Image: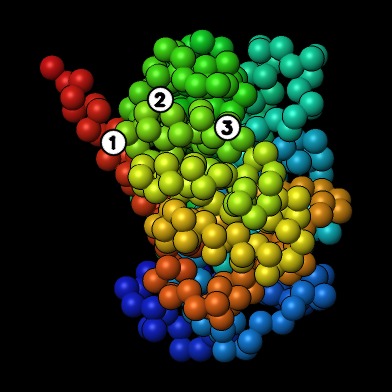
Amino acid sequence: MSRWHHISSLPAAAETGANAMADLQDDPHADPSLPVGPGSVGIEDVSAPAAVPGALERAAELLAVHPVADGCNSLVWTLSQSPYHDIDTPDTGIDTDIPRLRAGGVGAQFWSLLVPPGRTREGGAADQVVSDTLELIDVALALVRRYPDGLRLGLTADDMMDARNKGRIASYLGPVSGATLTGSLGALRAFHALGVRILAPAGAPWAREGLTAFGHEVVKEVNRLAMLLDLTGCPPVAACQLAAASKAPVIVSNTGAAALTAHPDNVTDEVLLALRTAGGLAMVTFDTARTGDSLHAVADHLDHLRAVAGPECVGLGAAFGTEGATPRPTGLTDPSGYPRLLAELLERGWPESDLALLTWGNAQRVLRDAEFTARAAQHRRTP
């Protein structure tokens, strides 16, 4: 039986919260002696505030049908630097592994292929950026091949549903940096052929202050290929231009509300309104510098994004996948904390329909809309 059942109505998803969480943790390769789930010793920090039991059960039931589609995880970079990690078993050296993804109800993951700032070799020359990105793509594809019982490569929106129904975590490659294109749409098409489905314009010369002529061509080609534009880190002016220029929805894969925390990578209300107009998606990160040091603070950011952009434009992009003591909000130190966050939102009065959009529905929609835009563009080009 698959870990997540394709059921049309939420009340029928599980008889009890305990049964639903058991479905989420149905991993034939997991160590049966290891406690999993929110609050488990060795998985989630025990100092986190406890959720009301009824809300936690409802969160588990919801995740059984609408698992989390997480917009950002940098595990691929971490594994490229420390390849000895085995994510099939709990690993205290990193914050992401398959048992904790399952315990948190993660059903889809976007694996970042960005090289951290200052880490590109040889001074960051353009050809080295491309080389480093190709190496990360190779690591990502090897990761999916190595764990076929846990991960499944995602290329389309249908793959997201198919992976969920077969008990796998749909794994999408991207974003790659827009700086890798070096003036070539052929490079973009080559990345797409390798499985990349997201491009991040931030820092690219064609989208620094505004879109250049080449930048407009990039947006058109991204739309034609059914790829997504990730506006994380783009200045507000450029972000609004990109959202307006794209005929498909754009995303911000990991962010917070600038109105609550004045961080340069957090989205302003102006950008949120542009996303609302464009049908885009802003995905909230779990980063103490950007969204506060507690689960409650992260929920405040989600409340703000939902109020400004609307429930159809809010998602989750935790930015896990790191080694060591990366500062994380209490209660959200690894992916197993997702049920507790949903329980907090339930207690704040979020309807389950909005939570279903937050976790799964909105990510599924932007992928499908990108594919619809691509089909329309290809039809227009047909003689």
Q: Is 289 on the left or on the right of 27, as rendered? A: right
- The x, y position of residue 35, in whole percent, is 74, 77
Res. 234 mark = 3
Residue kind at label 2, given as amino acid type: Val
Instruction: Tell me the tag on residue 219.
Output: 2
Which residue is painted at 49% across and 11% down in the image? 184
Q: Residues within 10 Å of mark 3 (few under 14, many from 20)?
A: many
Left or right: 235 in relation to 306: right
Rendered view: 158 above or below 30: above
Q: Which residue is mark 1?
A: 373
Q: Quadrant of residue 310?
A: bottom left
Going 82% across and 51% down the picture, which residue do you hit? 326
**Residue 130 location, x and y as percent?**
63, 18
Asked if one can make out residue 268 in the rendered structure from this viewpoint, the answer is yes
Looking at marks 3 and 1 on the same chain, the residue that comes earlier in the sequence is marked by 3
Disc 1 or 2, which lies upstream in sequence?
2
Q: Within 10 angstroms of label 2, few (less than 14), some, or many (20 or more) residues?
A: many
Q: Which mark is residue 69?
A: none
In this rendering, the count of numbered labels is 3
Instruction: Name the kind of residue labelled 3 in the image.
Output: Cys
Secondary element type, mark 1: helix
Mark 3 or 2: in front is 3
The extreme left residue here reads 383
Give the alpha-carbon distance from disc 3 to disc 2, as whole Å.
Answer: 15 Å
| Residue sitting at x 27%, y 40% | 372
| Alpha carbon distance from label 1 to label 2 | 12 Å
